[in-house]
Amino acid sequence: MKGIVTKSTGSWYEVKNEAGQMMLCRIRGKFRIKGIKTTNPVAVGDWVDYHLEQGKDTGIITHIYPRKNYLLRRSTNLSKLYHILAANIDRVFVTVTLTQPETTTIFIDRILVTAEAYNIPAVILLNKVDLLNTESLAKQKETFKEIYRKAGYQVLEVSAVTGYNIDKLKTLMKATTSMFTGHSGTGKSSLINAVEPGLHVKIGDISKVHRQGKHTTTFARMYDLSFGGHIIDTPGIRGFGVVDMKPEELDAYFSEIFKYKTDCKFNNCRHIREPGCAVKPAVKTGEIPLSRYKSYLQLLDEIENDSGPYR
């Protein structure tokens, strides 16, 4: 029988077959992505074949169909293993907040670069805009939006509390398989409940000590949407290291940097200290936002040294 994996708990997987029936399955044998060692060979969003275990009401996954894409992250700090967050994604929504807690730009850029590398369209959801009620926060919001619009990304302001722009979010999600990801505490679960109230996804509190979210989503899970399509909720991520990427290809995943690359004196310019670099002058004039350039430099250093700090 063929089905789609809707929940992964590490050793067991919930699989929904083409008739809509659910089956609890496990794997037998080894499944691997060629050249990449993963902690979870089967991921939410995977299409699989399975058969019933003899004398039991559980199944065995026997085959994984080729994925059109998948999103990976390092499993732990400095680890050589990777974790598949989800597979066969039509769009990833990166949920960010500018306060309570504040999402760092390097974290956002890690996810965006990874999505670019795996050909997954990304939309930035700027959540909790109802809290941006001071002049300084309003200015910070406009600066943030300009940075990522210049990079070619749609930035959608939303509020799970007031319902602001939830209708626009639902339009983007209709008839697609969407993935929500982001730091703990950015309101992923609240947004999912706002989009589909009947799901009753558990919502966590914000830590008063570190102003960060507490993990409430332990495992990735796919939900059906009443207005068509599916949504994959993933655990709140505190770190996101880039995966399986070569230094010379990194600038292609920063559109505003790549735009100037052809004007560099050397075609292998790393945009650091090379003479005749066209990128560095664009950073000085503000054509390339400084935060994006700093993210590029940090990621380049991590890739070249295979370090991948987990923050």
Image (tube, helix red, strand yellow):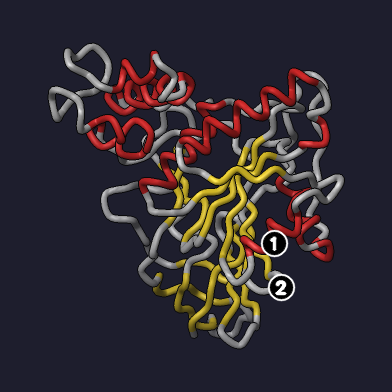
- What SS does tag 2 mark? loop
User: Which residue has dot 1 on it?
Assistant: 170
Residues at marks 2 and 1, CA–CA distance in whole angstroms: 8 Å
Q: Residues within 10 Å of mark 2 (few under 14, many from 20)?
A: few
Picture coordinates of residue 236 (x, y %)? 65, 41
Is residue 157 or residue 200 the one in the foreground?
Answer: 157
- What SS does tag 1 mark? helix
Give the left or right position of residue 87, taking residue 130 as reference. left
Q: Residue furthest left?
A: 266
Give the left or right position of residue 210, taking residue 200 as reference. left
- Picture layout, residue 100 above or below residue 171: above
Of label 2 and label 1, which has the lower sequence position? 1
Picture coordinates of residue 185 (x, y %)? 73, 35
Residue at image location 28% in from the left, 30% down from the top = 260
Of the residues shown, which amino acid type is indicated by label 2? Phe
Picture coordinates of residue 226 (x, y %)? 74, 73
Q: Residue furthest right?
A: 162
Quadrant of residue 55 within the rendered picture = bottom right
Is residue 108 or residue 233 the one in the foreground?
Answer: 108
Marks 2,1: beta carbons within 8 A: yes
Picture coordinates of residue 56 (x, y %)? 61, 81
Residue at image location 70% in from the left, 43% down from the top = 157
User: Which residue has dot 2 on it?
Assistant: 227
- Picture layout, residue 157 above or below residue 271: below
Quadrant of residue 187 within the rendered picture = top right
Residue at image location 38% in from the left, 51% down from the top = 118
Residue at image location 56% in from the left, 71% down from the top = 25
Residue 62 tag number? none
Q: How many marks?
A: 2
